[in-house]
């Protein structure tokens, strides 16, 4: 699949089949994120992968618990404050990291949903998962085999987005 078709056809997947993601695929998802660009090549992202009961702990922190329950794996993406040098640039880099992972996931015929609402409970999540105080939770990705094919996406016309 060419890159533009990959980008255009990617969708957020919220319902998954009961199927395991191969360890090598999971490693490659993280590898895709690792190769995102970052200012001064500081690579400010860190990852935590949860599955089984580990991921199910997160369900009480979101209205979208069904997405987490159905996913095979959950990837938490953090900003490592120790490696951060410019918050705005680092947040853009983490966005690029996540997009790399989402595109790789889609290229493997898997699906993912980037969960944002759960970040409202990041302090409680930190207490439960006990990750380092230098890590700040920035994103949660639910990953699995799509239950069905998503609908075609919609976007604004390009002419409405380009400013003169």
Image (tube, rainbow, N blue to C red):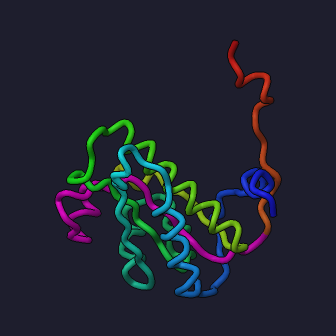
Q: Nearer the viewer, residue 126 or 59?
A: 126
Count of numbered circles on the image? 0
State the residue lying farthest toward the left: 133
State the residue lying farthest toward the top: 164
Decide if residue 28 is on the left or right side of residue 87: right
95 lies above or below 60: above
Residue 146: horizontal and vertical position, in percent? 70, 73
Q: Is residue 145 magenta?
A: yes
Decide if residue 114 is on the left or right side of residue 127: right
Residue 71: horizontal and vertical position, in percent? 55, 75
Q: Is residue 3 magenta?
A: no
Instruction: Give the residue at x 50% y 70%.
Output: 31
Q: Nearer the viewer, residue 25 or 67?
A: 25
The residue range painted magenta reads 122-148
56 lies above or below 85: below
Instruction: Give the residue at x 30% y 38%.
Output: 86
Quarter of the image with the N terminus is: bottom right
Q: Nearer the viewer, residue 129 or 42?
A: 42
Decide if residue 132 is on the left or right side of residue 142: left
Residue 122: horizontal and vertical position, in percent? 30, 55
Quarter of the image with the C terminus is: top right
Instruction: Give the residue at x 50% y 78%.
Output: 27
Instruction: Give the residue at x 51% y 75%.
Output: 69
Decide if residue 66 is on the left or right side of residue 3: left
143 lies above or below 164: below
Residue 43: horizontal and vertical position, in percent? 37, 55
């Amino acid at each position: 699949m060419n890159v533009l078709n990959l980008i255009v056809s990617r969708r957020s997947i919220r319902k998954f089949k009961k199927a395991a993601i191969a360890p090598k695929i999971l490693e490659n998802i993280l590898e895709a994120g690792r190769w995102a660009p970052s200012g001064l090549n500081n690579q400010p992202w860190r990852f935590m992968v949860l599955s089984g009961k580990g991921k199910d702990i997160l369900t009480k922190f979101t209205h979208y618990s069904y997405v987490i329950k159905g996913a095979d794996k959950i990837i938490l993406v953090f900003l490592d404050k120790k490696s951060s040098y410019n918050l705005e640039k680092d947040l853009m880099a983490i966005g690029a990291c996540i997009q790399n992972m989402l595109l790789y996931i889609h290229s493997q015929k898997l699906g993912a949903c980037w969960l944002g609402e759960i970040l409202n409970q990041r302090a409680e999540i930190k207490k439960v998962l006990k990750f380092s105080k230098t890590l700040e939770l920035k994103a949660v990705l639910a990953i699995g085999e799509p239950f069905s094919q998503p609908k075609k996406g919609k976007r604004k016309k390009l002419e409405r987005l380009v400013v003169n």
